Each structure stands twice: as C-alpha cells, then as structure tokens.
Image: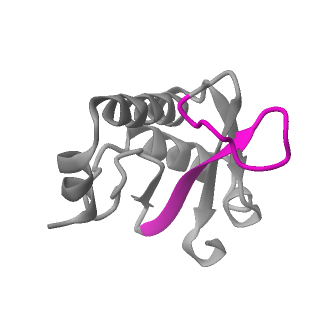
Amino acid sequence: MNKQSDLHEIESPSAAAHRGTIQQLNDALRGTGQGGRLVLTPGVRALGPERVAALVAAVAAFDAFTPENDPYGEHDFGAVEVNGDRYYWKIDYYGRQSSGHSFDPANAEVTLRVLTIMLIAEY
C-alpha cells in the first residue's frame, strides 16, 4: 500500500473533510491566484515575462496528482514541464498573525498560503 491509500482507509470523516478543504484552498490558489501569494524564485524571474507567463499557466492547469506525488492529498506540490524544462511548485502554509507555520491550514482566516514556483536547482 502507499501512504495516500493507507491514509484514506483509516482517516475519520472529519479528517477527510479537513484534508479536502486544504486541497480546495490549494487548488484555488494555484488555479486562480486568489487566496494567497505567488512567489517566483530568482531563477524563474530571470526567465523573462513570456516564459514566466507560460510557467504560471502550466502550474495553474496542473492536475496530475497521484499517490506518489501527493501522498497526503493536499495538492501542495508538483512538477511541470514548459518548453522541455521541468520546474517545481509548492504551497506552504503560514500563520497570518505569527511568523511560523499555520496551526490550521484548512482555515483561510488564519492561514496565508504561499505558492512558490522554482527551478529544480532552487529546490
């Protein structure tokens, strides 16, 4: 068995709903740019506006989640290919009122989502 199928077999309905909310919030940020911040690493910014636009569009369209690349079902990490080059993206959860990670990533009121798009070498 893999982590995701094991997780889904033993989690309670409330845990599944919590994970589903995180997934929806992450999909909304990635797909629309709403609900958080977008950070482009220096290497990505250096690609130029046309390449960056294509990369952001590829991240927004990403839906190839599998148990291997999304073991916790949160849709918080992925890899995309643009013009033959691969890039990573990830979403982190920060507390709006603190400098640390959010204590409840399913709660948009207390969580600031940050979507970072990077060169693989910058990971």
Whether residue 66 appears in this view of the structure is no
Q: Position of residue 105 (x, y in %)?
A: 58, 37
In the figure, 105 relative to 79: above or below?
Answer: above
Quadrant containing the C terminus is: bottom right
Say whether residue 117 is left or right of residue 40. left
Magenta part of the chain? 85-106
| Residue furthest bottom in the image | 121
In the image, is residue 122 part of the stretch drawn in magenta? no
In the figure, 78 relative to 35: above or below?
Answer: below
Q: Kindly identify the residue that appears in the image at 68 percent across and 42 percent down.
A: 102
Q: Position of residue 77 (x, y in %)?
A: 47, 55
Whether residue 78 appears in this view of the structure is yes
In the image, is residue 87 part of the stretch drawn in magenta? yes
| Residue furthest left in the image | 1
Quadrant containing the N terminus is: bottom left
Residue 13 in which image quadrant: top left
Say whether residue 77 is left or right of residue 8. right
Q: Nearer the viewer, residue 84 or 31?
A: 31
Residue 62 in which image quadrant: top left
Q: Kindly identify the residue that appears in the image at 47 percent across and 46 percent down.
A: 59
Q: Nearer the viewer, residue 31 or 55?
A: 31
Q: Nearer the viewer, residue 13 or 20?
A: 13
Q: Position of residue 112 (x, y in %)?
A: 70, 35
